[in-house]
Image (cartoon, rainbow, N blue to C red):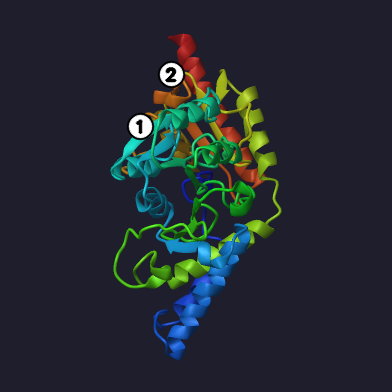
Amino acid sequence: MRTYLDHNATSPLRPEAGKAMMAALELHGNASSVHEEGRKARAVIETARDVIARELGTIAPTIVFTSGGSESCNQALCGVSASRIIVSSVEHPCVLEAARAAGCQVDVADVDEAGVVDLQALEQLLDDGEGRVLVSVMLANNETGAIQPVRDVVAIAQKHNALVHCDAVQAFGKIPVNFGLLGVDMLSVSAHKLGGPQGVGALVVRDGLPVAPLIAGGGQELRRRAGTENTAGIAGFAAAARAASQTESDIKGLRLQIESVLEDGPGEVVVFSADVDRLPNTVCFALNGLEADTALMAFDLDGIAVSSGSACSSGKVQSSHVLEAMGAGEIATKSAIRVSLGWSSTVEDVSRFSDSWQKIAGRHVARAAAA
């Protein structure tokens, strides 16, 4: 039996999403066609747009369907006219790389030891520059789960007439995300982080804000993203978002059980961002000297899927720029493990994790003592 504890990478497809996708796959019309078959496909997309908008506290015309979080973030950073972009040092690589690709000055705002953006440093950066500025700060970190003070970021940015983009990919479906209450100008979300299909997401754009498309061609998505829409994927996204908002589960309780296992188990374990608001499902931790790749292989052999603090696209364990920005030092480069729970997680999953960790950490501590 496998135990899946890597929901921040991809959460398994919810049954509701799978059912909605299968129904949409029966439709063979193009949503841009005016005939009956096309109108049926269009109806699925627009119903989904209404659902996503409602779940995000906005209106349907602000929703631009995309291929996922990375595309949404790229369009936000590259699609607005700005002379300077400010990002936090713990942003997802798709934001950091998109900022560099935007062709303007890029400044980086530091974070504190808990991984929370330094608001004074941000304000100083805004004071020091000129021209139109775009600030991009994530709502919740994908590695540590730390929740950022986005509303405070918006308040500071507005004093300087700066725009704000928020990467809410890891937050949506795990905590309430309300576009209107956050006050940001753009917000990125993705389906597969909350139990929807891979390859679909959305960019929310404040009404009236011009954002250039990354993909030119047809007039789809109100001319903001060309290409025939992924009707089945969009249907699955909406079904997953609706299910996530209706799910009552004690994810935080399971996380606290895992943290208790780590605290009471062998060796001295560090839990990153432990003293700040975090996603209820995320634990990023390290046992000094136990290399992440060794632990990941041992967990996998025990039938448990977890991840390192950061994994590149090839799947190799790499140093985490997030933990390095937090000043975690050597632990950040070699030892960070991320456990992320989700809609399908159970008490039995936590128990199997506990049994495996006791063995893995126990062996490591014994070897270290004998050395």
Per the image, label 1 sits on a secondary structure element best described as: loop
Per the image, label 2 sits on a secondary structure element best described as: loop
Q: Residue furthest bottom?
A: 35
Residue nearest the observer in this picture, 7 or 369: 7
Query: On the rendered image, what quadrant is the C terminus found in?
Result: top left
Amino acid at pointer 2:
Gly
7 is higher (above) or lower (below) than 45: above
Badge 1 local density, few (<14 within 10 Å), some, or many (20+)? some
Q: Nearer the viewer, mark 1 or mark 2?
A: 2
Q: Residue 294 — which label?
A: none
Q: Residue 52, image x and y in percent?
A: 57, 63
Q: What residue do we see at 54% from left, 48% from top? A: 184
Residue nearest the observer in this picture, 241 or 95: 95
292 is higher (above) or lower (below) than 204: above
Residue 361 located left or right of residue 250: left
Find the distance from the CA under tag 1 to the CA under tag 2.
14 Å
Q: Quadrant of residue 93?
A: top left
Q: Residue 318 — which label?
A: 1
Q: Residue 356, image x and y in percent?
A: 54, 34
Q: Residue 329 — which label?
A: 2
Q: What residue do we see at 41% from left, 83% from top? A: 29
Whether residue 100 is visible to the viewer of this picture, yes or no, is yes
204 is higher (above) or lower (below) than 91: below
Amino acid at pointer 1:
Gln
